[in-house]
Amino acid sequence: MRSIKEAVLTGTHFIDGDVACAEGAIAAGCRFAAGYPITPSTEVVERLAARFPMVGGMFVQMEDELASSIAIIGAAWGGVKAMTVSSGPGISLMQEHIGLAVMTETPTVWVNVQRGGPSTGLPTLPAQADMMQAKWGSHGDYPALALCPNSPQEAFDLTIRAFNFAERFRTPVMVLLDEAVGHMLEKVVIPDAEAIDVDVRRYTDKPPALYKPYECTEGSLVPDLAPVGQGYYFHVTGLTHDERGYPIMTADTQADLMDRLMRKIDQDAVADIRESEVEGCEVLVVSYGITSRVAERAIRDARRQGIRVGHLRLVTVWPFPERIVRDRATQGSVKRVVVPELNLGQMVREVERAVVGERPVRLVGHAGGAVHDPNVIFEAIMEEAS
Amino acid sequence: MSSRDTQALQAIPVNSPMEKWLRMDRMPHIWCPGCGIGTAVNCFVRAIEKSGIPRDKLAVVSGIGCTGRVAGYIKLDSFHTTHGRAIPFAIGLKLANPELHVVVFSGDGDLIAIGGNHFIHAARRNVDITVICVNNFTYGMTGGQVAPTSPKFSVATTTPYGNLESPFNLAHLADSSGASYVARYTTFHVRPLVNTMKEALTKNGFSFVEVLSPCPTLFARRNRLGDGLDIMRLFKEKSIRRDGLSTDAAVMDLENGPIVVGKFKDRPREAFLDVYNDAMTKALGKDRFKPYGPVTMRDPDGGPVGDNGR
């Protein structure tokens, strides 16, 4: 399926990551958004509020994040692609509904333009403070799917991909920008609508009498949706449920449901890792988001000093691509792994978990409020190489 | 069970007219003997039948709690959401699919305590949804804790020495927040309830129906009000009907009376989508804005997805 020509602003633009994210959503077919103002994400919904009425969409500013985050779930069941947008504290408030979207298998996109925390923290300044919130924020076990752009162009591209993943896996998908990417003005090329692949919502072929809301067809772990208002009389609940969608609160039903939910998003199917001079490197830098661009400078400087530095940039951060990270980090040449991130140690734990003690892993943390000084990352690389 | 009870049960016709509206594979339900939620559901189903609204175009959204289980028993497209958030879910559903009649069916704790903010804003926003609140003055599902509807000095598990707070007048709250339609009845008032639910279903804008309901197990027992039948008697004896009465005067005193019931408000007020379409047409012009109407995203021919057919 191709994107809608009239809605896509094909051309070359000079826009920030927030606006690019909004345009990506429109290009992906999103036609409903609900949100509540919060810095540094507000520009996304401001753009949608201006653009949606011209493309058949609607933005509603709700009374709080709780309302925003469930209004989009209602809208998705109503038949449209929907998203909400927020930042750290607002995402904290939305967590219960991320769980509801997981449990009810509702395709939705959640944009988090990260800022410094905890609490009100640093509203106008960057951080990568919510990487673990994106995985573990809602209660219970669940599969998280999150993408991390490092430029306005990627904010556009990955928002489209987030919508496609949401439809493909019937799951909430988070786009993890940060204040720096969100407010950074750069060139963004929006392609022709025909060049943008858009996943269509998959509805059941079965008549109502044969339809079960959470029954998967052979070989699939993702059940087909039924359209609302067409006589299916389906039931949806956040309670543990069986294939009929009825609440069955037993350990067996829970085990069956959780097993499928945890398996339906395969890390290799959604993995996107950008590699630079990884083969034969002695120091491997693993980074993501805005920090990957700062790390690029440090890596370039280290390479000029004759150090063989490889760079793994995680675009899909959840599910964590542990098989690939393990494979690259434990190749014979690698002596050390360096993980710079704009927090005090979140994804570094995942890297350590993937490497299982086979290589030393060094965190180059930063409490947030600014991006790293590239020299700090450079010095860490040089120390680890010596 | 005595043989008399068994005989009485057997005397109930197997094919009750209610059955086609219920998920019979979910019976028996969880509600206690003497509870009023079943009566409210019964009235609701009759109201649907009277309203002429096509069954397929009705959706029910519930929050969490005893009344929250309505969505699980009623055979319509039905959504059992999170605690307190049925209203914003319903707003998203309605705005995405305006041809649906969206009904929120939930309890007082769910809608007014944890969901209170959504309730007042939905009335203010006046999106065309119907909210039916079964008010049993307590939290039933969790075992009888105090609610923002519990009468002052009433006993609950979390107010063992009496509730020190004054309850909300829900009708007044809805009215002063801007609801288009506001009514209150008790589960004793079956016929008026059916009529008022029917009116609420077909009213364009935010409509609110409060249904006072007995909770014999947790509220009545602790407060020495007897069983379900005693509460029904109390509803019968203490209630007075005052249609059109100003909602601030629509008082409710369970102990001494009166319990004022009736249709308090039915006012013409443009619903959210109508305002939206008018305002956007003015702001953007007819060539740039297409009114937001009853269409769905689903396109059987595999046509463009995402533009809602607009």
Image: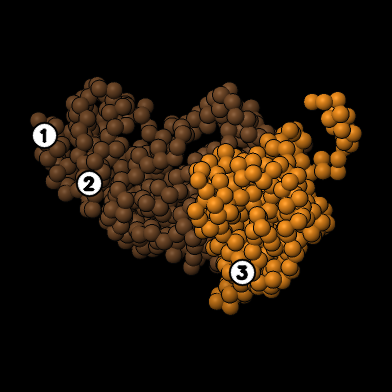
Q: Are marks 1 and 2 on the same chain?
A: yes
Q: Position of residue B299 (x, y in %)?
A: 68, 51
Query: Any mark on residue A367, and which?
Result: 2
Label 3 secondary element:
helix
Tell me where residue B24 sits by quadrant. Answer: top right
Q: In this picture, is A334 found above or below B144?
A: above
Colour representing chain A: brown
Colour representing chain B: orange
Q: Badge 1, how many Cα within 10 Å: few under 14, some, many 20+?
A: few
Query: At label 3, which amino acid type do we have?
Result: Asp
B134, A85: nearer the viewer: B134
Give yes or no for contact between labels 1 and 2 (Cβ–Cβ under 8 Å): no
Q: Disc 2 or disc 3, which is closer to the eye? A: 3
Q: Quadrant of the C terminus of chain B?
A: bottom right
Q: Disc 1 or disc 3, which is closer to the eye? A: 3
Q: Residue drawn 64% across and 58% down?
A: B253
Query: Any mark on residue A383, and which?
Result: 1
Query: Any mark on residue A160, and which?
Result: none
Q: Are marks 2 and 3 on the same chain?
A: no
Q: Position of residue A377 (x, y in %)?
A: 17, 42
Q: Is residue B206 something one can see in this rendering?
A: no
| Residue annotated with mark 3 | B248
Label 2 secondary element:
loop
